[in-house]
Image (tube, rainbow, N blue to C red):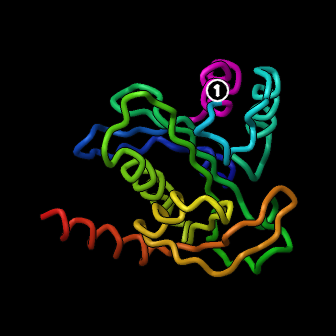
Amino acid sequence: MNRLNRMNRMSGTTATDIGTFTIRALDPLKDAELLHSWVTHPKAAFWMMQNAKLQEVEREYMAIAAAEHHHAYLGLRDGEPAFLMEKYDPRYIELVGLYEPEPGDVGMHFLVAPTDTPVHGFTRAVITAVMAELFADPATRRVVVEPDVTNKAVHALNEVVGFVPEREIEKPEKRALLSFCTREQFDAAIREARSVAI
């Protein structure tokens, strides 16, 4: 399997107490209307597409689909669309010149679908499923994230799955908190979460 096929392959399943999560490749045309409703929702302010038109969302995700170092996926809960996931190679996009990448680094973004009936623990289950999927690739050694410094909710979630903040960085679109999670840190965080749940 060549590198590009491996980067595009996502088909893992994660069973949790609140449902079964699966991840599939995003279809930028078929999924555009759904994505548009998510990224323009007030709760998605940190996604920075609040005023995007449907055609702009289509164009953005068609460009990602055509990119070698950036990939988008739709996450499903019990077969229903529930979250958006992006993975990228930080050597080529997002973080170029802002840190020293290491072999096996993978960048990640995720967005949970807005809902009027929130489920306790849902977002935590989503980020856990996303991380499990990324680490299912043996080539992934460390996940890199760069959320907005003011996004306290996602900082707390990141910490739960093992991320450790390194420093603040200045990106063109935001001031971000550069954070890392190794495979070992993720495994330890999951073990701790299980021991607390017992």
In this rendering, would 2 be left or right of 63?
left
Is residue 37 rendered magenta in the image?
yes
Percent position (x, y) of residue 163?
A: 50, 72
Q: Quadrant of residue 187?
A: bottom left
Is residue 78 rendered magenta in the image?
no
Residue interval drawn in magenta: 25-40
Above or below: residue 152 compared with residue 142 = above
Q: What residue is disc 1 on? A: 27
In this rendering, would 47 be left or right of 34?
right
Residue located at (79% from left, 59% from top): 174
Residue located at (58% from left, 39% from top): 43
Q: How many marks?
A: 1
Q: Quadrant of the C terminus?
A: bottom left
Residue located at (67% from left, 48% from top): 46
Q: Quadrant of residue 102?
A: bottom right
Percent position (x, y) of residue 185?
A: 43, 77
